[in-house]
Image (tube, grey):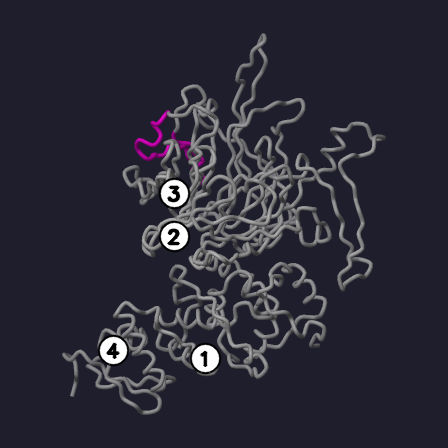
């Protein structure tokens, strides 16, 4: 009986139980599943987590081809649980990302157990050399930042070519910030200005450098950032990056806006394209880029009036327009400070907004029907003045991410002042507090990112842009902070 | 005679046993459903090849549990790998979505965190990578092999030709 490939649709992720198979089986194996048709193999592989999938990639050439196929990668991505990447946030380069897959089992650990945050991924280092040399401008002066120390590897592979290099790197040159994550890829940026520089897939280690724009800021051309974003256009299967700058000119002791620069780069092409949009946006700052349905959304903070609204840019029609926002949320003007206590994101196809403007409460809104303003629903209102959670601190508390959706019993995760995560599941547990151990850093940065095996080679489509891989380039490079192993443990309150 | 108005459908397994199942259960088997719909007259009994009576027993168990809302209690742990494979093929033949996903998940659970060698043996697959190709692909995905919950590779040193 002929069956179409992938004819049996895969519903959303079901609870995975980490059963341990009896080890004695290992010694008496004979091929049980020999001669299984390949579309059955695919159905089995789709149920494996990413780590096991990569092990299976090494089984044989056919399996490698099956797993690398873009359609398979896409199907598998839809089954991957919502995840977060955690990275230390301090004076260091912090190129290490620790993955936290938000599956319920992770949060059901008892209070004595530690769950290691694994696996660990690395981001590339920003290219320090050219910047450093330019800033030095004195070639004779010894380069102060880099101190290469060759260390003999004392492990079992101590032959000549496996020496570890300890690089003394400085975040000023080497650190990347993150713009946003979209469809399994991360867009990395300069940590100061925020302009996008690199697209990477931390799981596969691949990354590409975005081409330089003719309008990029330089020592001569000072530009002020308005907003940046990274998105995916499903109709053309392309990824696009956006940068928006304001260019000012000096007019007798003040500066005047000359024009706003709005540019798009289709990932894989070599240049940035200018797009004409309503220059009204130039008086605002756009934050929390979130891509959904081929549209990039931002929360717009208007300069003078402190008004907040949602702005969106449709990648297909290339139009910038406003987007319905939840009622009442954006009319709060409790704060005029720069620590905007509102954030936005996307989870499993739904746009959410987390509002922390009220001193005690954290409110989460979800847009149940995309594009329909009335469908913004207040789903949670959490009173964080519960004494067990410590003093509510408006500036640090309250970033939250929805983890599961409402059929399975919703839950969400809150980040609470310095390395504490609060897991809130209203049906079963209420609040559970978890602490992140293993690092000296006082704070961590949480990046919502669902891992995917999508290969940048398929994204780039062609030879214009070189796809680099950190595992081949920097395999021997180790930063000093990379001995840290983060783990999560529950705190009894 | 024809059992059109009754709620039971007769299914005959490969080993000759006849099971009378509820129409609702037969509906979850898309293969059976297609046979019923395509027939001109009402079918008296439907033969299902590749499905044995012990498979039907388990299928009926699963159906009863899922109707009661307890489908998570269904377990195939007691099946050894051979039995699991046969069951999976039977359910695949019958085209039963939910149960199929449960079974593929069960197989995936048995493979999770196992070494490359284990997976190869399990599926009876021979390594067709050259040593260089294998080393390259291992290096590229090195992080997936690290971690104390992963079974170490046994036969890495001895590559098959």
Residue B26, quarter of the rendered image: bottom left
Chain of the residue where label 3 is placed in the rendered structure: A
* In-front residue for pair A398/A354: A398
Q: Give the residue pinned by disc 3.
A: A351
Residue located 51% across and 28% down the image: A226
Does label 4 lie on the same chain as label 2? no
Instruction: Choose the circle earlier in sequence order: 2 or 3.
Output: 3
How far separated are the C-alphas under marks 2 and 3? Answer: 13 Å
Does label 3 lie on the same chain as label 1? no
Chain of the residue where label 2 is placed in the rendered structure: A
Whether pointer 4 and pointer 1 mark residues with C-beta atoms closer than 8 Å, the reply is: no
Q: Give the residue pinned by disc 1.
A: B85
Instruction: Tell me the element at label 3.
Output: strand
Residue located 59% across and 13% down the image: A250
Does label 1 lie on the same chain as label 4? yes
Relative side of A144 to A435, left or right? right
Relative side of A352 to A174, left or right? left
Q: Which residues are magenta?
A: A309-333
Instruction: Tell me the element at label 2.
Output: strand
Q: Give the residue pinned by disc 2.
A: A404
Q: Give the residue pinned by disc 4.
A: B36
What is the x, y in percent for residue A348? Answer: 40, 50
């Amino acid at each position: 009986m002929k069956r179409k490939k992938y004819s049996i649709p895969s519903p959303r992720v079901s609870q995975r139980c980490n059963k341990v198979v009896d080890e004695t089986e290992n010694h008496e194996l004979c091929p049980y599943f020999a001669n299984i048709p390949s579309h059955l193999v695919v159905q089995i592989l789709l149920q494996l987590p990413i780590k096991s999938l990569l092990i299976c990639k090494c089984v044989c050439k056919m399996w490698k081809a099956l797993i690398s196929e873009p359609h398979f990668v896409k199907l598998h991505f839809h089954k991957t649980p919502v995840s977060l990447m955690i990275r230390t946030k301090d004076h260091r380069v912090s190129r290490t990302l620790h993955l936290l897959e938000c599956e319920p089992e992770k949060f059901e650990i008892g209070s004595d157990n530690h769950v290691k945050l694994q696996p660990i991924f690395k981001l590339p280092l920003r290219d320090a050399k050219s910047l450093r040399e330019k800033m030095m401008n004195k070639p004779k002066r010894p380069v102060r930042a880099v101190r290469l120390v060759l260390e003999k590897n004392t492990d079992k592979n101590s032959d000549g070519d496996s020496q570890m290099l300890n690089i003394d790197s400085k975040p000023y040159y080497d650190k990347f910030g993150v713009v946003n994550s979209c469809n399994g890829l991360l867009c990395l940026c300069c940590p100061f200005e925020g302009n996008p520089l690199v697209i990477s897939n931390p799981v596969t280690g691949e990354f590409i450098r975005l081409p330089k724009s003719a309008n990029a800021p330089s020592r001569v051309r000072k530009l002020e950032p308005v907003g940046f974003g990274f998105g995916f256009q499903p109709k053309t299967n392309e990824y696009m990056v956006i940068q928006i700058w304001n260019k000012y000119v000096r007019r007798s002791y003040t500066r005047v806006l000359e024009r706003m620069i709005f540019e798009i780069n289709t990932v894989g092409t070599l240049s940035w394209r200018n797009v004409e949009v309503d220059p009204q946006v130039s008086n605002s700052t756009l934050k929390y880029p979130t891509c959904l349905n081929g549209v990039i959304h931002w929360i717009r903070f208007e300069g003078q009036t402190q008004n907040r609204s949602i702005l969106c840019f449709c990648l297909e029609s290339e139009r910038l327009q406003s987007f319905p926002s939840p009622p009442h949320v954006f009319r709060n003007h409790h704060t005029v400070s720069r620590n905007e206590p509102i954030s936005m994101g996307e989870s499993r196809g739904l746009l959410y907004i987390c509002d922390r403007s009220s001193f005690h409460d954290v409110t989460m809104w979800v847009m149940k029907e995309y594009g329909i303003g009335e469908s913004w629903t207040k789903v949670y209102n959490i009173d964080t003045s519960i004494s067990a959670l410590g003093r509510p601190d408006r500036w640090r508390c309250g970033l939250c991410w929805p983890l599961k959706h409402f059929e399975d019993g919703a839950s969400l995760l809150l980040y609470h002042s310095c390395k504490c995560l609060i897991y809130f599941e209203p049906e079963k547990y209420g609040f559970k507090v978890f602490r992140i151990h293993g690092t000296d850093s006082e704070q961590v940065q949480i990046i919502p990112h669902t891992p995917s095996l999508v290969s940048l080679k398929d994204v780039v489509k062609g030879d214009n842009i070189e796809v680099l891989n950190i595992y081949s380039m920097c395999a021997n490079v180790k930063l000093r902070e990379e001995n840290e192993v983060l783990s999560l443990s529950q705190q009894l309150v | 005679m024809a059992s059109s108005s009754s709620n039971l459908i007769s299914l005959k397994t490969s080993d000759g046993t006849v099971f009378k199942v509820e129409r609702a259960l037969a509906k979850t088997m898309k293969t059976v459903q297609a046979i019923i719909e395509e027939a001109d007259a009402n079918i008296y009994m439907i033969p299902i090849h590749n499905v044995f009576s012990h498979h039907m027993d388990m299928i009926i168990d699963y159906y009863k549990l899922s109707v009661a809302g307890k489908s998570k209690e269904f377990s195939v742990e007691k099946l050894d790998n051979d039995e699991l494979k046969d069951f999976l093929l039977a359910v695949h033949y019958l085209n039963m979505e939910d149960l199929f996903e449960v079974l593929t998940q069960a197989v995936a659970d048995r493979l999770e965190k196992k070494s490359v060698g284990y997976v190869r043996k399990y599926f009876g697959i021979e390594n067709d990578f050259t040593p260089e190709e294998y080393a390259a692909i291992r290096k590229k995905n090195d992080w997936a092999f690290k971690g104390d919950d992963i079974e170490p590779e046994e036969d890495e040193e001895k590559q098959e030709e």
